[in-house]
Image (tube, helix red, strand yellow):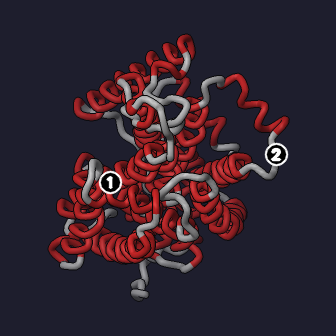
């Protein structure tokens, strides 16, 4: 770890003033408002199509008796995957005492919270009768993997929200005390959410202790959530899912797409908030790029293992499934996903120039997009390979309808809206964690911030 130079109290107070000015939330400009309106339009379109689905049932989708999982489940697996970044960037790096994580943790946490919220919602969308959700809690059977998923998703959501909220308390109090030209409702929101925070040393000690406990708790839960999700597939009689490798395969892929999400978020924040360049530096992109390469290599290993052994045997429907993926109908999508979502990022990010902000952003977007289509390939092709006889051919295939695409895009837009509104109203980079990372003594932080409150 790099040695932090000693800072005088005067320098420290000047730096804290600068951090407050740079990192407090700011009003959106034209681009930010346009982005928000666009997301709202997509989200409301999805809501409208979902109301039609509630009235007419799942008949408006492409799902039928034999193809009963579609892009809703693909989207669910994608959301669960990207949500694991909260445990990676916050818990793992925090417990390892990696100092450069400070500007990245809150980006990872809000991505995790937004994703896991919509993971839960998209499952309700997939149910033809959402009013029966309560039955899973009242009459669920512990033998069912779906109940396992309900338990780990709800637990992980709770821990992720707490892991976001506790370290955010000082930031909310900064907004309460330092933002002046804001509406009364916004000030009341900060006052309520800050829970009477007054920047005392004892409060910071409690927050740090809580973060340590939550970090220890969330890692096994994070591994469980994606392992259990993989069991939903592996315990189902479908070609392509009969695998004992699915747990590690899903977890490694989840860490990869989550890290890609953080890299994309870093670039966008730095691009549209010039003051963030001092905190999201080229060095941060370089380190995240190396982490992305490591995760991509691990995922490549499990991907090869996932396909190599079944391809060696090529038995029955498994062989038919692999033929469709390798050389058949799904081959263009399959090989594009492998190349653009795994091979190309490894090749580019191995070099230092490839880990600069813009190339990193391009590679991160490729990883995210290909990760969604990879989940599509995990779910959809397996639905088509059942030993069905004397049935119309169209019954064996699935094509998403417009309402399905609209609802899916609406859910993605909804997750992005949560992140967008968070950036608008709360500090996306933690002032006090940045101060500690850069060597400002805790006593100076408390003293300076308490003076601000007195003013």
- The quarter of the rendered structure image containing the C terminus is top right
> Vertically, is 370 above or below 137?
below
The reply, left or right, for residue 302 in relation to residue 135 is left
- x 40%, y 56%: residue: 321
Q: What SS does tag 1 mark? A: helix
For this orientation, the residue located farthest to the front is 390
**Horizontal and vertical percent position of residue 290:** 32, 76
Task: Give 47 or 177, whichever is nearer the viewer.
Answer: 47
> Who's the residue at 65% across and 23% down the image?
129
- Residue 95 against residue 362 in the figure, above or below: below
Q: Position of residue 330 (x, y in %)?
A: 29, 50
Indicate whether 310 appears above or below 379.
Answer: below
Pinpoint residue 440: horizontal percent, then vertical percent.
Answer: 48, 73
Q: Which circle marks residue 439 in the picture?
A: none
Distance from Cα at disc 2 to Cα at disc 1: 36 Å
Residue topped by disc 2 = 141
Foreground of the two, 144 or 116: 144
**Quadrant including the N terminus:** bottom left
Frontmost residue, 319 versus 266: 319
Query: Which residue bears the numbered disc 1?
Result: 324
Mark 2, secondary structure of its residue: loop
Which is more N-terminal, label 1 or label 2? 2
Q: Residues within 10 Å of mark 2 (few under 14, many from 20)?
A: few
Q: Residue furthest right?
A: 138
């Amino acid at each position: 770890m790099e040695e932090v130079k000693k800072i005088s109290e005067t320098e420290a107070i000047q730096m804290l003033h600068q951090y407050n000015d740079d990192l407090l939330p700011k009003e959106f400009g034209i681009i930010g408002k346009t982005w928000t309106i666009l997301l709202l339009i997509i989200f409301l379109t999805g809501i409208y199509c979902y109301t039609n689905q509630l009235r007419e049932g799942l008949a408006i989708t492409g799902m039928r008796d034999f193809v009963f999982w579609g892009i809703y489940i693909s989207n669910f697996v994608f959301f669960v995957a990207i949500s694991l970044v909260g445990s990676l960037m916050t818990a793992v790096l925090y417990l390892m005492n990696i100092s450069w994580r400070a500007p990245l943790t809150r980006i990872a946490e809000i991505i995790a919270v937004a994703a896991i919220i919509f993971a839960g919602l998209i499952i309700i969308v997939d149910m033809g009768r959402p009013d029966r959700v309560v039955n899973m809690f009242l009459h669920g059977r512990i033998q069912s993997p779906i109940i396992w998923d309900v338990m780990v998703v709800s637990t992980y959501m709770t821990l992720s929200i707490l892991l976001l909220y506790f370290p955010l308390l000082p930031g909310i109090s900064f907004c309460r005390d330092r933002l002046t030209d804001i509406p009364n409702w916004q000030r009341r929101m900060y006052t309520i959410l800050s829970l009477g925070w007054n920047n005392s040393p004892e409060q910071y000690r409690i927050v740090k202790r809580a973060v340590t406990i939550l970090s220890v708790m969330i890692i096994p839960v994070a591994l469980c959530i994606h392992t259990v999700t993989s069991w939903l597939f592996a315990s189902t009689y479908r070609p392509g899912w009969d695998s004992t490798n699915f747990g590690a395969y899903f977890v490694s892929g989840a860490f990869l797409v989550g890290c890609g999400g953080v890299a994309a978020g870093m670039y966008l924040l730095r691009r549209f908030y010039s003051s963030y360049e001092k905190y999201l530096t080229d060095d941060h992109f370089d380190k995240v790029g190396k982490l992305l390469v490591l995760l991509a290599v691990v995922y490549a290993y499990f991907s090869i293992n996932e396909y190599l052994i079944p391809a060696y045997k090529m038995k029955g429907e498994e062989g038919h499934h692999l033929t469709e993926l390798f050389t058949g109908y799904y081959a263009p999508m399959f090989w594009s996903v492998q190349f653009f979502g795994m091979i190309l990022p490894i090749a580019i990010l191995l070099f230092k120039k490839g880990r600069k902000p813009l190339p990193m952003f391009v590679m991160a977007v490729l990883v995210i997009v290909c990760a969604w289509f990879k989940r599509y390939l995990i779910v959809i092709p397996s639905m088509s390979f059942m030993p069905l006889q004397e049935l119309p051919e169209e019954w064996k295939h699935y094509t998403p309808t417009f309402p399905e695409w609209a609802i899916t895009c609406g859910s993605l837009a909804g997750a992005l809206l949560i992140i967008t509104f968070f950036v608008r109203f709360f500090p996306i980079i933690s002032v006090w964690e940045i101060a500690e990372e850069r060597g400002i003594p805790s006593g100076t932080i408390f003293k300076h911030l308490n003076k601000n409150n007195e003013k």
